[in-house]
Amino acid sequence: MKAMIYREFGPAEVMHYEDLPEPKPGPGEIKIEVHACSVNRVLDVAVRAGKQPQRNVQLPHIGGVDPVGIVTELGAGVTDRKIGDTVAVFQGLGGRKMFGIHCWGGYAEYTTAPAIATCIVPKGVSFADACVLARHAPVAWNLLVHLGKIKAGEWILVMGAAGNLGSIGIQLAKNLGAKVIACAGSDERCTIARELGADHTINYKTHDLKAEIMRLTDGHGLDLVYDNIANPETTAKAIEALGFDGRLVTAGAHGGPIVPVNFFHVYDHRITIMGSPQSYPVDAMPALEDAARGKMRVLIERVMPLGQAVEAHRLVEASPATGKIILDPTLG
């Protein structure tokens, strides 16, 4: 099979497109013909560059943390998957082990994964869309529902609205009945957020974020802030725009990570701040089912052949795209 492998950390060129033996599924595992695997800024690009030594990636390595494809072989003891199923692979392998980090990942024509770490993709959802949703929707659901306790009718601010977590967060929050304000750093990204269903948008580079939030909510303030950026200026203002018993949930900090916090407002308004990167495979299903019903749109920048992974990594490093770049090993 063809796979994208690297034997040292460094620039994108350390990856090589090579012929390798096809993997065999062990007990409890399934073999998957990969049709989509995304390029993640941290877990693929930064890991390959050697900027994530805490991940303890062992070389040589094949990246790709979120493959989606078709089951072609079952390992011993697998009864809840069958050949021909379309499945998505989740990151968590138990403990602190992650698929595509602590084992070889999906940048290959075939990969293997524990059946328990996969879900069946509903009919009508593309490989590329399922790849993005299985990667990000469980985190978004955990933030909004398990941590944030979102309720219908509440005011929620989605930060980084045109990013992957942001775009999914907007749609999940709307589908759960919330009133969504989305903020981004350009009019173009605000337009994307409105197209995804946001009730209001704020360009934080041209408007005062807190003032606009208080105006839009008639002085009530926010009930929930959903963040994965930790921009020192905008996140600080978002916290000050939280109303009484407001909550902030976060699963990222690449725009910070240090944010000045007005702790008078935090204790005076009984604010709760919660962070967690945790996710649960079952929490991908609401978004996947929404996508199957046409109620969830996924932002895809482009789909590229696996053999162009070097170029794909360069593109992700060069600029923040408004959607995912997907690698498809079945393309020529």
Image (cartoon, helix red, strand yellow):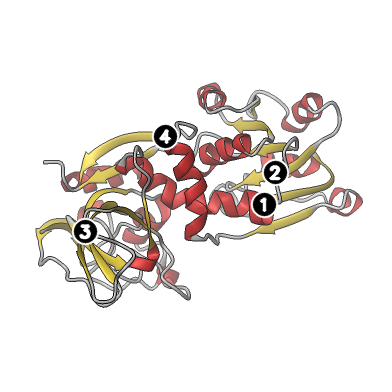
Dividing the image into 4 quarters, which one contains the C terminus? top left
- Left or right: residue 134 versus residue 64 is right
In this figure, which residue is indicated by the disc labeled 2?
225
Q: Amino acid at mark 4?
A: Leu
Disc 1 is placed on an element classified as strand
Q: Residues within 10 Å of mark 3 (few under 14, many from 20)?
A: few
Decide: few, some or many residues near mark 2? Use Cα within 10 Å; few <14, some 14-19, many ≥20: many
Residue depicted at x 88% and y 48%: 269
- Asked if one can make out residue 294 in the rendered structure from this viewpoint, the answer is yes
Mark 4: which secondary structure?
A: loop
Dot label at residue 249: 1
Instruction: Please state, as top left, top right, bottom left or bottom right, where the N terminus lies in the image.
Output: bottom left
| Lower sequence index among marks 3 and 1 | 3
- For the residues marked 1 and 2, what is the alpha-carbon distance in whole angstroms? 6 Å
Q: Earlier in the sequence, mark 1 or mark 2?
A: 2
The residue lying at 84 percent from left, 53 percent from top is 263
Earlier-in-chain disc, 1 versus 4: 1
| Mark identifier at residue 20 | none
Cβ atoms under marks 1 and 4 closer than 8 Å: no
Q: Residue at x 80, y 28 (%)?
A: 217
Q: Which residue is mark 4?
A: 299
- The residue wearing badge 3 is 83
